[in-house]
Amino acid sequence: MPKRPRNSEEGIIEGVRYVPSPNCDERPAGSAIVLLVIHHISLPPGEFGGPGIVELFTNRLDPDAHSFYATVAGTRVSAHFLIRRDGELYQFVPCGARAWHSGESSWKGRAQCNDFSIGVELEGTGAAPFTDAQYERLAALTRELKARYPIRDIVGHSDVAPGRKSDPGPNFDWVRYRAMLKVRRKGAKDAKKIRTKLRTARTPRRERKAKKK
């Protein structure tokens, strides 16, 4: 299980690979972060582990390096986070800034999801299952973000841009992911109960009676 990441005051996760992207700007004034959007990406399509995703998000993609790159080399996009197949976590945009990940989108009648969301890319194609390491890292990251921001909903790109986008696709296991979040919450509550019982057991009986009075 990956260690819980720590989030700095600037909205940058400590201890991860931070590669600043120029493809971001300020959120509209008063836009609270209430949505988490999950995507998938692979560059070249169907290939994993190469520099293509990082180069795309930092405007350094060489259109001559692959036949597909010429179709996306001029695109200005980014996400806040990328989770590689081995679980390695990259950050491109501080959480407080607006990453350009959802495009034309809406959620619950509210347009422009980039204004009020955080975008997480999983390295994948949607045609193959995601890895155990990716689920573990995503769950840990989600817990950290929910502890810091008032995130109410977690959705796929296909939910905010139906008909236009299909990611993270049918192979993303929403049941497993949400269960991992619930297990950790239950574990934290159980641990708190145990700590309370231990403190009570260590308190002398006369002191406990005095507190009840």
Image (cartoon, grey):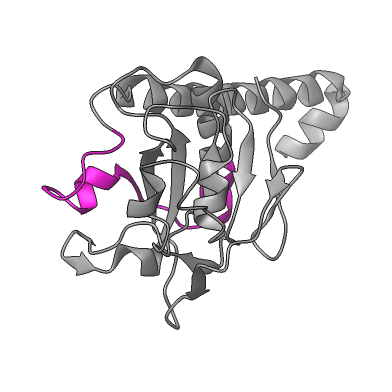
In the picture as drawn, the residue positioned furthest to the left comes out as 163
Residue sitting at x 56%, y 51%: 55
Left-right relation of 134 to 15: left
**Magenta-drawn segment:** 144-168
Residue sitting at x 58%, y 33%: 140
Residue sitting at x 56%, y 29%: 49
Q: Quadrant of the N terminus?
A: top right
Residue sitting at x 51%, y 55%: 57
Is residue 60 covered in magenta? no
Look at the image and tell me whether residue 62 can be seen. yes
Is residue 149 covered in magenta? yes
Q: Between residues 110 and 212, which one lies in front from this camera angle?
A: 110
- Reply above or below: 25 against 135: below
Look at the image and tell me whether residue 80 can be seen. no
| Residue 29 horizontal/vertical position (percent) | 45, 83
Image quadrant in which you'd find residue 204: top right
Q: Quadrant of the C terminus?
A: top right
| Residue 197 horizontal/vertical position (percent) | 72, 21
